[in-house]
């Protein structure tokens, strides 16, 4: 897919098939994150944790259920894999912007590969602010200087990704001045 088609084809997926994503595909998606623009090129301030199996993703979901007290909570909808972006400066706006650039690149790479993707922010924030953060870090095997900021859930899905000619967004104001 060319770039503009890929941008127009991306959409959030919230129903995934129970099928593992091959390692080389995950590596390709991770490479897209490494091409993202990063403020002042402080690349070393960011860290990616790839949950490569459904078993690891289910462990994440179990933590979210424990944190929320909701035994049916399912923030990643049975994804086959997840990539969590962490940063050294979780209180800096720029770190969230950096993570978002990496995440969007990964969403687009997944779309190009016909793999469903979802930007998962809420559950990461809830775990980050909770007493379960040490167990979340442990699941990610995260080096201690990093804190989780955002994530992408990934999986094969029934949806096909075709460019949509009209954006879903009809509400954002635009002025050409
Ligand atoms: C910063 C950010 C945080 C998001 N967090 C979540 C989330 O925690 N859970 C979720 O299901 N979707 C999340 N989304 C996905 C949005 O709900 C989705 O992009 C929006 O509804 C537009 O739909 P589309 O992605 O299909 O175009 C997030 C998107 C962004 C950009």
Image (spheres, rainbow, N blue to C red):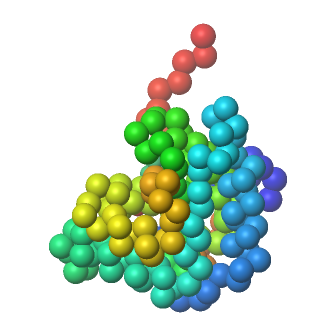
Residue 168 position (above or below residue 174): below
Residue at image location 59% in from the left, 46% down from the top: 45
Residue 154: % across, % down: 57, 71
Left or right of residue 57, residue 116 in this image: right
Residue at image location 47% in from the left, 59% down from the top: 144
Residue 33 seen in this snapshot:
yes
Q: Quadrant of the N terminus?
A: bottom right
In the displayed orientation, state which residue is furthest to the top: 177
Q: Quadrant of the C terminus?
A: top right
Residue at image location 54% in from the left, 18% down from the top: 175
Left or right of residue 22, residue 149 in this image: left
Residue 117 seen in this snapshot:
no
Left or right of residue 112, residue 125 in this image: left
**Residue 22, located in which quarter of the rendered image?**
bottom right
| Closer to us: 106 or 174 | 106
Q: Which image quarter has ligand 1?
A: bottom left
Residue 6: % across, % down: 71, 55
Residue 165: % across, % down: 65, 49
Residue at image location 32% in from the left, 75% down from the top: 63
Residue 2 position (above or below residue 37): below
In the displayed orientation, state which residue is furthest to the right: 2
């Amino acid at each position: 897919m060319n770039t503009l088609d890929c941008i127009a084809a991306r959409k959030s997926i919230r129903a995934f098939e129970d099928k593992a994503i091959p390692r080389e595909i995950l590596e390709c998606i991770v490479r897209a994150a490494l091409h993202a623009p990063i403020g002042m090129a402080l690349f070393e301030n960011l860290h990616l944790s790839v949950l490569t199996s459904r078993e690891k993703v289910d462990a994440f979901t179990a933590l979210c259920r424990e944190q929320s007290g909701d035994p049916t909570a399912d923030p990643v909808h049975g994804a086959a894999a997840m990539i969590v972006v962490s940063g050294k400066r979780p209180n800096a706006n720029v770190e969230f912007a950096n993570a978002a650039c990496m995440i969007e690149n990964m969403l687009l790479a997944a779309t190009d590969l016909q793999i469903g993707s979802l930007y998962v922010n809420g559950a990461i924030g809830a775990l980050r602010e909770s007493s379960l953060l040490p167990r979340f870090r442990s699941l990610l095997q995260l080096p201690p200087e990093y804190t989780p900021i955002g994530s992408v859930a990934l999986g094969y899905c029934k949806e096909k990704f075709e460019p949509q000619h009209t954006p879903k967004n009809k509400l954002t104001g635009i002025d050409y001045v």
